[in-house]
Amino acid sequence: MSEGQRVAIVGAGAIVQVAHLPALARMRDVRVVGICDSDVSKAHAVASRFGIPAVYDDIEQLLVEARPDAVAICTPNHLHEVHVLAALSGGGGAHVLCERPRALSAAGVERLRAAAQRADRTLMVGMNHRFRSDVQAVRQFLKSGDLGGVLGVRAGWYIFRTTGQTVGWRQREAQAGGGAMLDLGLSLIDLSLWLTGCPTPTVVSAVLRQRLPDVEEAGCVLIACKEGLSIFVDVARRYVGDHERFWLDVTCAHGSAGIHPLRVFRELHGAPVNVTPTGAAGREDPFSASYRSEWAHFLAIARGAVPRPDLADQVMLHRTIEAIYASAGRGRDVTL
């Protein structure tokens, strides 16, 4: 299109302001044609800051009047499914990039998968960590087989939120769908499965610590997979330390790899050798770069330059998440 791909944003919260709109502003042949939020004053403020020409408080009106080719859904979790369905069908149908989680249940993910197929439109979930430069480097090593077969993944994410923080939608189960495990753990589990070739989870054992009124503030889970490897994920939203912690380590038969920072070791001639590639990190910080790369990939799919994702992996991911909450609630292992 001569005028570029027309993009609309649904939601005007923090992730839109610090990630999506800055990424789109750096991309050629992209026009943000409208933003929609129930808080119109906030939407107007964001539109003024980023030069967005139209503001709406109704998604249907946005779809009809702004005529976007693609829509980003960045609303509270419980609204994702209904907003994705609206974007796929309203105003002639648009391609959709939805912030995680795509829906609050595996059944919801299945419904969205079917709706995207019926509408003949792209539906992609915002798993931005897949697009980090260090993650991409690790994936290349794992795909090449240089490190041998994968034995397991160990990952974690600790962030700090004050105890006196105002209770918002992320602290309410009906709106968030879950706490730290869904908020932080979902993306780490997705990353672990994606990096290791999408093995099949068979048994999960989870412990979640609930301190907030509705949702857990921390938890951990061990996932056993059919292919013999295991995944362990540890998350916390009340970690008191000097900085946020985020890590993922993969152990293999003949080596290991990790991110943040990137490091790769390989057994050569009976000794561990550091084979970490140099130059994998650019000037742009990994967070910003991951969102820009995610958008570039999504818009390439929308143009037909890249095959559409099947979404079957997202169905399995959400079945695993449901099993995690079931395991924690019952106090025992759950078989998928």
Image (cartoon, rainbow, N blue to C red):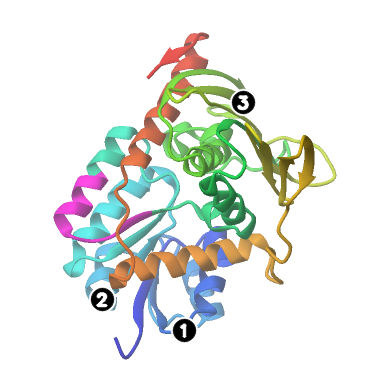
Q: Compare residues 282 and 229 and report the one nearer the observer.
A: 229
Q: Compare residues 48 and 290 and report the one nearer the observer.
A: 290
In the displayed image of the protein, which residue is found farthest to the right? Answer: 242
Q: Give the mark toward the camera: 3 or 2.
A: 3
Q: Is residue 115 magenta?
A: yes
Q: Residues within 10 Å of mark 2 (few under 14, many from 20)?
A: many
Q: Is residue 53 above or below residue 277?
A: below
**The quadrant where residue 255 appears:** top right
* SS category of the residue bearing label 3: strand
* SS category of the residue bearing label 2: loop
Q: Compare residues 228 and 45 and report the one nearer the observer.
A: 228
Question: What residue does disc 3 label?
Answer: 219
Task: Pick the quarter of the image with the C terminus.
Answer: top left
Distance between mark 3 and mark 2 Cα atoms: 43 Å
Question: What residue does disc 1 label?
Answer: 28
Residue shown at the point (57%, 26%) measured from the top left: 213
Q: Give the mark toward the camera: 1 or 3.
A: 1
Distance between mark 2 and mark 1 Cα atoms: 19 Å
Q: Compare residues 287 and 264 and report the one nearer the observer.
A: 264
Sequence order check, earlier mark of 2 and 1: 1
Sequence order check, earlier mark of 3 and 2: 2
Magenta-tinted stretch: 112-124
Question: What residue does disc 2 label?
Answer: 67
* SS category of the residue bearing label 1: loop
Residue shown at the point (61%, 55%) measured from the top left: 137
Residue shown at the point (19%, 50%) measured from the top left: 115
Sequence order check, earlier mark of 1 and 3: 1
Image x and y of residue 156, in percent: 66, 36
Amino acid at circle 2? Arg
Image x and y of residue 36, in percent: 39, 66
Amino acid at circle 1? Arg
